[in-house]
Image (cartoon, rainbow, N blue to C red):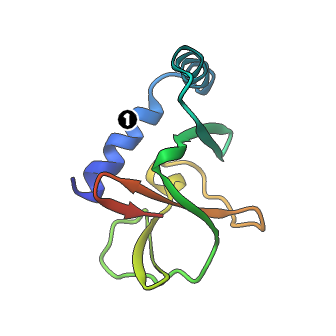
Amino acid sequence: MKYNDLFNHLHDKLSHGTCDHTLKHAKAFAEASGSLQLVSFRLGEEEYGIEITKIREIILITEITRVPQTPHYVKGLINLRSTVIPVIDLRTRFALPAGEMTDESRIMVLHVGTKTIG
């Protein structure tokens, strides 16, 4: 799956229904199955969740190297212990208002299929 396809899929999944509906559905699923654990994060006023099993690690913002001729939502690349990882700005990808990076900002490094992204 290409990165663009991956983020279109992720956007579709995250943008259906309200945040409250999504979180209520996740909570109901977790209670029924006893196995769903999520890491939540905010983009603007919305709260999202990603299955904990998809998250490799959460790191502090590090130097991001811009790459020419990439989609506008690709912030660039990071080098994480000799592994080059593309960093995606979900605010930009989902056409949300730009936000400043703060001391609380983090990069979530995820495994999605065979890809690793931040």
Percent across and percent down for residue 104 are 76, 62
Which residue is pictured at 64% across the width and 37% down the height? 47
Residue 56, compared with residue 21, is above or below; it is: below
Direction from residue 39 to residue 118 in the image, left or right: left
Direction from residue 102 to residue 8 in the image, left or right: left
* Residue located beneath label 1 in the image: 12
Q: How many marks?
A: 1
Which residue is pictured at 57% across the width and 83% down the height? 63
Judge the density around disc 1: few (<14), some (14-19), many (≥20) Cα neighbours within 10 Å.
Answer: few
Q: Tell me where residue 10 sits by quadrant.
A: top left
Which residue is pictured at 40% across the width and 41% down the height? 11
Residue 38, compared with residue 109, is above or below; it is: above
Residue 100, compared with residue 15, is above or below; it is: below
Please identify the residue farthest to the right as the structure is shown: 103
Residue 46 vs residue 52, the one in the foreground: 52
Percent across and percent down for residue 30 are 56, 22
Residue 79 vs residue 4, the one in the foreground: 79
Direction from residue 115 to residue 95 in the image, left or right: right
Please identify the residue farthest to the left as the structure is shown: 1
Residue 111 vs residue 117, the one in the foreground: 111
Which residue is pictured at 54% across the width and 18% down the height? 25
Percent across and percent down for residue 65 are 47, 84
**Tag 1: residue type?**
Asp
